[in-house]
Image: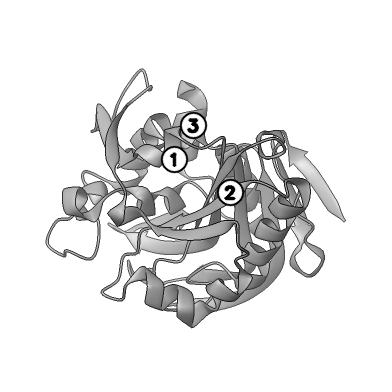
């Protein structure tokens, strides 16, 4: 059913996706799941409820007593509660699961562990990342065009939603424009070495892939693929997804691999 071509990552057919949680989830008291739910638009703009449901159900199966915190920070005028309701997320949460808005959480400064920070020597993100025992990012596979270059968004880019908009906004209060300067591929390296390296698991929903003709991450074309990529290494999972789907491996993935 699943095959592995890169250490730390494997793929499965979406229709038979059977999530295998990371080892850190087995005895965790608290698990943080960060899904891509930043817009009031369904998949492939956001992660499908089928994939997210499988992740949550598998976590509950291997750890019946853990508190599971679903954490997202939106990039839309529509608030998280409305987006979650529109997608039907609340119907998937059991008594031990809670939905939290990242913009409402206390934030602390995370030092950049990279030997060569691109822009940020440190970044502010929820303190909660240090207060849980397991962290999993569940992204959607998307390609947009930014500054005339293709930008791949998958499990690592999904972490943008954890950064407080109040601190990283630019012209629009709804987005995190500061994280686009000098370039998203550059800032993604800082994201990985500030908080990305903390994540124990990654999932990329590519049941349908999203392709935009411009920078807009919520308006574009949907192409059926029928794949889900997952594993214990965000960078390995994103690389496998790109290679399998015929996309060039992003420069930020290769830069992170060289520096870690």
The residue shown at (82%, 65%) is 16
Nearer to me, 64 or 92: 64
Identify residue for label 2.
Answer: 67
Query: Where's residue 167, x and y in %?
Result: 18, 48
Question: Relative to 260, is 98 above or below?
Answer: below
Q: Residue at x 26, y 29 (%)?
A: 122
Closer to the N terminus: mark 3 or mark 2? 2
Quick check: can you spot residue 158? yes
Which of the two labelled residues, at mark 1 and mark 2, occupies the earlier sequence position? 2
Which callout, 1 or 2, points to the residue nearer the camera?
A: 2
Question: What quarter of the picture does the N terminus occupy?
Answer: bottom right
- Left or right of 260, for residue 58: right
Which numbered tag is attached to residue 197?
3
> Mark on residue 251?
1
* Secondary structure state at the residue bearing disc 2: strand
Asked if the residue under mark 2 is in contact with the one under mark 1, i.e. CB atoms within 8 Å, the reply is: no
Query: Residue 38, located in which quarter of the rendered image?
Result: bottom left
- Placement of 219 over or under 228, stated as above or below: below
**Helix, strand or loop under label 3:** helix
Report, in whole angstroms, how far the alpha carbon at label 3 lies from the one at label 2: 22 Å
């Amino acid at each position: 059913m699943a095959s592995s071509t890169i250490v730390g990552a494997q793929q499965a057919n979406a229709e038979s996706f059977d999530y295998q949680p990371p080892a850190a989830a087995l005895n965790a008291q608290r698990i943080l799941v960060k899904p891509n739910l930043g817009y009031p638009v369904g998949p492939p703009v956001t992660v499908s409820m089928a994939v997210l449901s499988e992740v949550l159900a598998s976590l509950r199966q291997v750890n019946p007593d853990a508190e599971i915190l679903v954490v997202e920070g939106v990039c839309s005028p529509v608030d998280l509660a409305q987006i979650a309701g529109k997608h039907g997320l609340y119907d998937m949460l059991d008594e031990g699961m809670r939905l939290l808005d990242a913009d409402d959480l206390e934030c602390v400064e995370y030092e950049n562990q990279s030997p060569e920070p691109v822009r940020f020597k440190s970044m502010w993100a929820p303190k909660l990342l240090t207060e849980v025992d397991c962290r999993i990012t569940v992204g959607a596979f998307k390609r947009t065009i930014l500054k005339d270059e293709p930008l791949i968004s998958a499990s690592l880019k999904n972490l943008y939603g954890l950064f407080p908009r109040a601190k990283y906004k630019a012209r629009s209060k709804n987005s995190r424009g500061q994280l686009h300067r000098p370039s998203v591929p550059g800032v993604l390296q800082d994201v990985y070495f500030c908080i990305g390296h903390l994540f124990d698991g990654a999932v990329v929903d590519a049941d349908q892939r999203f392709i935009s003709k411009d920078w807009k991450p919520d308006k574009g074309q949907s192409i059926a693929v029928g794949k889900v990529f997952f594993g214990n290494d965000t960078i390995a999972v994103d690389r496998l997804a790109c290679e399998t789907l015929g996309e060039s491996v992003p420069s930020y993935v290769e830069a992170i691999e060289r520096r870690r």
